[in-house]
Image (cartoon, helix red, strand yellow):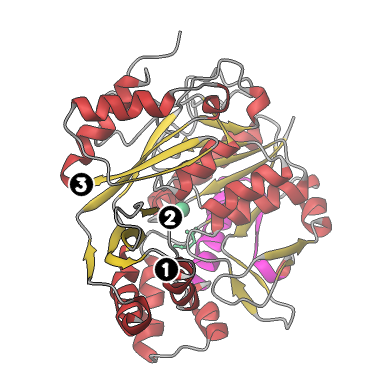
Amino acid sequence: MALIVMKFGGTSVADMDRIRNVAAHVKREVTAGNKVAVVVSAMAGRTNELVDFVNDATDTPDQREYDAVVSSGEQVTSGLLALCLQNEGVAARSWQGWQIPLLTDDAHGKARINDINGDELRQSIEAGVVAVIAGFQGISPLGRIATLGRGGSDTSAVAIAAALDADLCDIYTDVDGVYTTDPRIVAKARRLQKVSYEEMLEMASLGAKVLQTRSVELAMLKNVRLAVRSSFDDPVTTPAVNMDGTSTIGTLVCSEEEIVEQQVVSGIAYAKDEAKVTLISIADKPGIAAAVFGPLAEANINVDMIVQNVSADGLTTDMTFTVPEADLPSALAVLEGHKDVLNYKELLGATNIVKVSIIGVGMRSHAGVAAEMFKELAAKGINIQAITTSEIKISILIDAAYQELAVRTLHSLFGLDQEPE
Ligand code: ASP
Ligand code: MG
């Protein structure tokens, strides 16, 4: 017997039939003798619709009222799932964030969880009543409903699992696990049986949208074991995701020490929503980088990859960096506004680029991975425009036209096309 948290995303609760299907998944676990807390998202598309209503009402929404509106999608699905469970003879009740209570800070719209008092919740679960919890929401210090940022019900689930000291947090979604890369691009992409928190964090922030980044950070911090699995597997016969990672289904997200057979590279991620900014011929002297990036930071624009050439003449140089594509217009406006200080010859912005990254904790103990990567891309005629690295990741910026070729090439180069031996 175990205490488990089951989280179901928007596509898994998209309509009444799917909610009944979720109830069948929950009933399976209850019948097996487990104690269960369920965390649900709003029906697919519902939160977007609610956000649209808010923006229709006013151009400058009061964030507390924004939260009152957009949190309602989860209230609906939590009540409906409790009803469907009761209908199946499973004792269940719904819990809103404020009822638990799940305490947040007052950063409405993107609040962080401060604390969860799990006592009442635990008592109810121990008494055999399935807790159906509205994800994405909590209560602020002033007693107002606060939401946790888009995709935040993953974070709700992990936080609840930590507060209840659950044995496992199952994340049910519309894919059957975490893959070595995007299966839509590489047919040979494989489901990973296990992936470490660190790798999952890189994959999540680099564009593999299975889990909200914050939820993975929290799981790593609190040592919550996560299993990513599909809600479309047969709800009655599907097996559990094994703790030892030998499962035929799902992906276990766990600590690095639990992964014995570590590949050098575990996955390839890509991000298309980046843009490139180039400043041609700026002065090569102290203070210029600060003059470029200071105003961008003030405008809340995140800069990612940065390359600066060594100047040939010792006087001027070119500088290239990336920003989120949505921020390109404001980044260019900020730099135009500082033209008198920066004194560049030309300012260029481009969106026809893609960032491709290889990720793996095995890189910590392997030299030469970057060299191998660059050599193989060169052989395919792919030009690298910028590079950044961390201990467990190498990212390159390339022309968007080469995205698929690059991802496929790297997937085979690092042995991801076949199952590891
Ligand atoms: N319903 C919220 C959203 O769409 C939270 C979630 O689904 O995780 O962002
Ligand atoms: Mg989600």
Q: Is residue 81 magenta?
A: yes
Which residue in the protein does label 2 denote? 10
Q: Residue at x 48, y 58 (%)?
A: 151
Q: Give yes or no for contact between labels 1 and 2 (Cβ–Cβ under 8 Å).
A: yes
Decide if residue 189 is in sight here. Answer: no
Q: What percent of the width, then of the height, locates residue 285?
A: 43, 66
Residue bounds of the magenta highlight = 72-98
Q: Amino acid at mark 3?
A: Asp
Q: Is residue 410 shown above or below 390?
A: above
What mark, if any, has residue 90 been given in the picture? none
Q: Amino acid at mark 1?
A: Thr
Q: Amino acid at mark 2?
A: Gly
Q: What percent of the width, then of the height, locates residue 295?
A: 45, 77
**Marks 3 and 1, how far apart at CA:** 34 Å
Which residue in the protein does label 1 denote? 47
The answer to whether the beta carbon of the residue marked 1 is less than 8 Å from any atom of ligand 1 is yes
The answer to whether the beta carbon of the residue marked 2 is less than 8 Å from any atom of ligand 1 is yes
Q: Is residue 312 shown above or below 252?
A: below
**Marks 2 and 3, how far apart at CA:** 34 Å
Q: Is residue 13 left or right of residue 349?
A: right
Q: Is residue 86 shown above or below 144?
A: above
Which residue in the protein does label 3 denote? 399
Q: Nearer the viewer, mark 2 or mark 3?
A: 3
Label 1 sits on a secondary structure element that is helix
Q: Which comes sooner in the sequence, label 1 or label 2?
A: 2
Q: Which comes sooner in the sequence, label 3 or label 1?
A: 1
Q: Residue furthest top?
A: 421
